[in-house]
Image (tube, grey):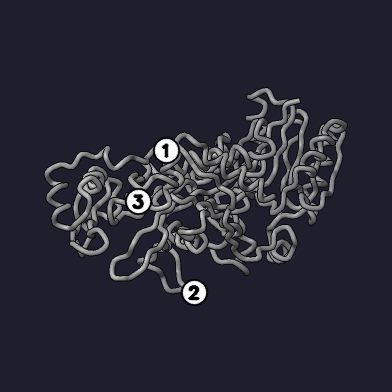
Amino acid sequence: MTVAIAILMKDPAEAKTRLKPTLGNDARETLALLLFENTLGFFCRFYGDNPLAVITPSERVAEIAHAHDATALGQNGKAGINGAAARAAEWAGSIGAERLLVIHADIPTLEAAEIASLIEAGNDAAVVIAESHDGGTNAILLSPPDAIPFSFGPRSADAHETAARGAGRDCTRLTLPNLCRDIDTPRDLLSASTSGSFRRQGVSLFAVAGIPEIGAGDDLSAAIAQALSDMGGELMPRDIVIVAQKIVSKSEARMFPLDAFVPSQRAIEIAAEIGKDARKVEAILSESSDIIRTRRQEPDGLLITRHRQGWICANAGIDQSNLGEGRDDMLLLLPEDPDASAARIRAGLEERYGGPVGVVITDTFGRPWRHGLVNVAIGVAGVPAVVDWTVRADAYGRGLKATLPAFADELAAASGLLMQKDAGLPVVIVRGLPWSDTPLASAGDFLRPLSQELFL
């Protein structure tokens, strides 16, 4: 029998109001989104073949649902949580589903075995109630989808059972160890944060060993998954995968021999001025929209340009290190569209593991006014490039007016601690970091408009 699944999700800005004594507005909104994305990712992973809908008044939540190929439905004027559930029943009926599983978005721990037992109980009862620890209803399975009217609220398990009996339908109530736990009150939050399944031990980073030499046309998501499997691991929902640009460019056939670049007169002149191979200068010019600085210096001259993607960097990001044996006369160019590259890797990983999973593609850049190199983000998928804190307050309640944390760059820089040049470790996993799935994110969000450049 076809089981349609509907996730009920409030507007995050209006969710978790009973947590006001414990959490500020931003923290409650972030928590609501984290719980929702965890729930959505779980059902995409374990029930991806079932019809899946998110009932929400929030456009932001609807975008996240669409990004995971779930149906997003408004409430069509139906008020409150029971109106949302009624909208879910209408949807399930319209697609011909024989059963409907309605579940709240704030269950911190979901287990496939518990959902399977809930659905299995539907073989013997038209109404199956997954009772919450306080007598509410965290999930309900109905056969058919409109078997009873919804009565979510205090002691709703009793109300749903009464409705089932009144309609002459068999009813089963289940109290499942994880499905009975939601997060509505400060006590719930404390219980969840100290439980083994939801506790955050802090952020962890680990490098993925065993990534093979990558060649043109290789599937990076498959290579990452195989290397993880060989390590005895796998990706978890909300992991962020940091990938070095080098293997992305190799997989996309962005490696060319020096002789493929025939020096123009301009390239010859610049090469003579700074002492760089004219062929390499031509390659740099072909990847650049503007020359920022030139200077003769060791080892082969300084040429800083604005890459056609907008980055200001040495040699337009063209690299000759770690290209492999016998490739001393080869050049590796940046990917044509690093955001698209990140999106392809993300899609492949989520197909294997579910999601949400974030992807950041990094390259190593120098920095104005500071010695040393750091990894920066040049492509993102799902992960926000920049987080806008200008509507938030600091720890003392003072409004923040110009605070834009470079989230993806911070991830990239952290990954550089493990992606050492001689380590052969081009993939790093970040685990345990809260982040909001941002389908429209782009590394281009980092770029400062030319009108705001004060030093060029």
Q: Which residue shows up at 46% across the image and 51% down it?
A: 244
Q: CA distance from mark 1 to mark 2?
A: 45 Å
Relative height, residue 410 to residue 260 (above, below): below
* Residue marked by disc 2: 395
The three-letter code of the residue at mark 3 reads: Asp
- The front one of 84 and 111 is 111
Q: Position of residue 127 (x, y in %)?
A: 81, 36
For residue 197, side relative to residue 282 (left or right)? right
User: Is the residue marked by circle 1 packed among few (<14), some (14-19), or many (20+) residues within 10 Å?
Assistant: some
Q: Position of residue 266 (x, y in %)?
A: 13, 46
- Is the C-beta separation of discs 2 and 3 under 8 Å? no
Note whether residue 168 is visible.
Answer: no
Q: Position of residue 335 (x, y in %)?
A: 38, 43
Q: Which residue shows up at 45% across the image and 59% down it?
A: 421
* Mark in the foreground, 2 or 3: 3
Q: Position of residue 280 (x, y in %)?
A: 25, 47
- The front one of 219 and 331 is 331
N-term-proximal mark, 2 vs 3: 3
Q: Which residue shows up at 61% across the image and 46% down it?
A: 227
* Residue marked by disc 1: 252
**Element under label 1?**
loop
For residue 277, side relative to residue 60 (left or right)? left
Point out the image quarter for the C terminus: bottom left
- Is the C-beta separation of discs 1 and 2 under 8 Å? no
User: Is the residue marked by circle 2 packed among few (<14), some (14-19), or many (20+) residues within 10 Å?
Assistant: few
User: Is the residue marked by circle 3 packed among few (<14), some (14-19), or many (20+) residues within 10 Å?
Assistant: some
N-term-proximal mark, 3 vs 1: 1
* Mark in the foreground, 3 or 1: 3
Relative height, residue 127 to residue 18 (above, below): above
**Element under label 2?**
loop
* Residue marked by disc 3: 319
